[in-house]
Amino acid sequence: LAKTTQPISMDSYEGQEVNITCSHNNIATNDYITWYQQFPSQGPRFIIQGYKTKVTNEVASLFIPADRKSSTLSLPRVSLSDTAVYYCLVESGETGGFKTIFGAGTRLFVKA
Amino acid sequence: GAVVSQHPSWVICKSGTSVKIECRSLDFQATTMFWYRQFPKQSLMLMATSNEGSKATYEQGVEKDKFLINHASLTLSTLTVTSAHPEDSSFYICSASRLAGLTDTQYFGPGTRLTVL
């Protein structure tokens, strides 16, 4: 399984764009990259998933370079409510099912 | 769509008792369900993976006789913590996926806070 590495924490201010980069050097061909957001005492919430190039939805963008060894989650114009832990996951398909290993995550603090 | 619920949301029990936590996929059929444990300020740790109608696959270091997992239907999985001890106090989170053997988004439940006195 591909291990992920993210910054432990990041600070930002309201209205700024935040980019969180994740490295996954040994990602496999069939692996997808998924980002989740977690607030205290809640289950993780799906943000975005991608395989290569760029994916955009209503809340974020995900940039994946051609070698797929890293990915960057971009949150446009963050607000105080975006303060949370963000997890980058490489989700692998395996025979009989797949498994997901969470890394340490990035604690994002958004200040007023 | 893709809502996962857990019951109870929190539970307090005495040491030595057993506690059952339910995980339900409310609007989809979950071929695969996962159980995680999360200690304060730490990341989620995968405990086991279960496919409907099959025995759960436990991660290394997770005692299968202590953490009993049943995935009897496509919408329900249960985790029973047997003979709970204070060190089992944690936040237990389940997730569900519609597909097995393929990459699919996991939909997470809200979690269950277990406190063992």
Image: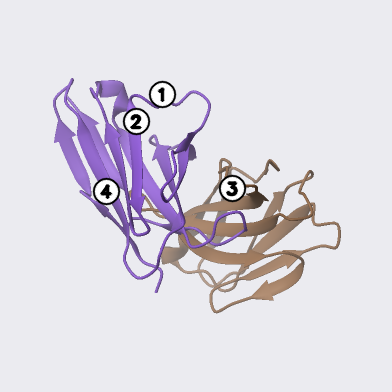
Chain colours: A brown, B purple
Cα distance, mark 4 to mark 2?
13 Å
Residue B66 pos. (x, y %): 33, 25
Classify mark 2: helix, strand or loop: strand
| Relative depth, front residue between A60 and B46 | B46
Q: Say which residue label 4 marks.
A: B22
SS of the residue under disc 3:
loop
The nearer-to-camera label among 3 and 2 is 3
Q: Percent position (x, y) of residue B53?
A: 41, 48
Quarter of the N terminus of chain B within the rendering: bottom left
Q: Is residue A44 visible?
A: no
Q: How many marks?
A: 4
Residue B63's disc is 1
Residue B111 relative to residue A31: left or right: left
x and y, in percent, of residue A104 in the image = 56, 40
Residue A96 has which mark? 3
Q: Name the residue that disc number 2 marks.
A: B67
Q: Give the amino acid at mark 2.
A: Phe
Q: Amino acid at mark 3?
A: Gly
Q: Residue furthest front?
A: B53
Specify the amino acid type for callout 4.
Answer: Glu
Tell which tag, 3 or 1, sits nearer the viewer.
Answer: 3
Residue at disc 4, secondary structure: strand
Q: CA distance from mark 4 to mark 3?
A: 23 Å
Q: Are marks 4 and 2 on the same chain?
A: yes
* Residue A58, above or below A38: below
Is B79 located above or below residue A56 in the figure? above
Residue at image x 37%, y 46%?
B93
Depicted A61 relative to depicted A34: above or below: below
